[in-house]
Amino acid sequence: MGDHLAQSDVRPENNGAIPALRWEEPPEGPVLVLLDQTRLPHEEVELVCTDVQALVGAIRSLAVRGAPLLGLAGAYGVALAAARGYDVEDAAELLARARPTAVNLEYGVRRAVAAYREAGVERGPAAVLAEAKALHAEDAAASTAMAGHGAGLLGELLPGGGYRILTHCNTGALVSGGEGTALAVVSGLHRAGELRRLWVDETRPLLQGARLTAYEAARAGMPYTLLADTAAGSLFAAGEVDVVLVGADRIAADGATANKVGTYPLAVLARHHGVPFVVVAPVTTVDLATPDGASIEVEQRPGSEVTDLAPSPLGTQAYNPAFDVTPPDLITAIVTENGVVSPVTPEGLASICGK
Ligand SMILES: CSC[C@H]1O[C@H](OP(=O)(O)O)[C@H](O)[C@@H]1O
C-alpha cells in the first residue's frame, strides 16, 4: 500500500476525532483524505489520495472499508478523477471493481458518473462533487434514522432495556458518513442508558472487531467486552446474549445477506438459542437486481491474511472468504433508514426500498 503514496501523503498522528474520509481542496489540487483503518487502533494516520490508483489501493487494503463508506469513497473517487482531469469513465471502472461484494461501492460510483454525464464536461467536476457530498449527507441521515428504528425494534422485541448485544466486525462511524449502521443503534442505546453490555467479536482474520469496534466503543465509553469469534457459542449457551446486531455488504432481493465472514454461524447460533438476529443496513445496501444469496459474489482474499496471523508453516494454504451469506429465514429483521422489514420477504424488501 505504501508504494501508492509518497511519504508526504502520510500525515502524522492526529489527536482529535478524525472522520473516516473527507474531501479537501488545498492549493495544489483536490484530495481525498482517509483515516487509515489498517493502522487503528494504536495509530491515527491519514492517507492523502491525490489519484484514483491510490484510492483503489486503499480500498483493496481496507485502509478505507465498510459498505456505506465504500459508497462514499467510490463517489468521491469519481469526483477526484473529474477534478484532476483524469478519464472519468476509466476511473469509474477501476473503482467499481476494487472490491466485489459491497454493492454500495458500485452504487456510489454509478451515481457519481451519472451526475457527471448529465452535467457535461464543463460542469461535470462540480456536479459530481455535489453528488458525492449529497450521498455523504444522505448516509449520515440514514445512520440517525437506523439508530431510531433499531431502538424501536429492540423495544418491541425485548421490552425493558438493559440490552446485552453481540456484534461482529465493525459497523460504526468508521464505515459511514454518520455513526454507522448496527453500531449506530448501539451508540444510541448507550446514550439512552439502555446498553448493559456490548459483546465484540474479534472478527478474524483482519480483526475489525478487536481493532475498530473496540476503538469506537472505548472512545464512546461503552461497557464492551472483546471475545474470540469461537467463544460466541458459549455466550449464547450461558444466556448472555439478548440480541445480535450486524451490518451488511449486500442484501439480495430475497433477503439473503452477505456480511463479514463469521456472521452466518452467529445467525445459526441465534436461531438455536432463540435470540433475535438483526441486520442493520441502509437501502443502498439492498440489491434488488441480485435475486438470492447464491448470486452474491463473495470476495476471496489472500490466504496470507490468515497464515500470517497464525503464523503457519511456510507454504500453508488458507481459505479466506471475506464474507459469508445468511439466508433470510435466519434473519429476524432488517433495519433500514426507511423502517424495519420483518419477517424478511422479497415483498417487504422491495417495499422498504420504495419499489
Ligand atoms: C455496515 S458496513 C460494515 C461491513 O463491512 C465490513 O466488511 P469490510 O471490513 O471487509 O469492509 C463488514 O462486512 C461489516 O459488516
Image (cartoon, rainbow, N blue to C red):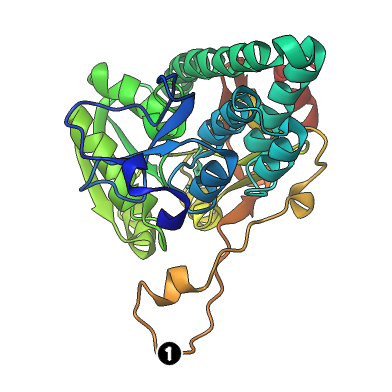
Residue drawn at (58%, 22%) of the image = 336
- x, y percent for residue 34: 40, 35
Q: In front: 162, or 210? A: 210
At a point 59% along the width and 17% down the height, the residue shown is 135
Locate the N terminus by quadrant.
bottom left
1 sits left or right of 332 in the view: left
Mark 1 is surrounded, within 10 Å at the Cα level, by few (under 14), some (14 to 19) or many (20 or more) other residues, namely few
User: Secondary structure beneath disc 1?
Assistant: loop
Q: Position of residue 220 (x, y in %)?
A: 22, 28
Residue shown at 77%/16% (left/top)?
A: 121
Residue type, label 1: Leu
Residue 281: percent from the left, percent from the top?
56, 30
329 horizontally vs 35: left or right = right
Residue 55 seen: yes
Direction from residue 10 to residue 246 in the image, left or right? right
Q: Quadrant of residue 241?
A: top left
Side (left or right) of 96 relative to 55: right
Residue indicated by mark 1? 314
Which residue is the extreme one toward the front?
28
Between 16 and 165, the one nearer to me in the picture = 16
Of the 4 image quadrants, the one containing the C terminus is: top right
User: In the image, residue 188 lies at what x, y percent?
Assistant: 33, 20
Write the residue at 35% across / 28% down.
Answer: 186
Relative depth, front residue between 328 and 259 = 259
- Does residue 256 show up? no
Tell which of 306 and 243 is nearer to you: 306
13 vs 81: above or below: below
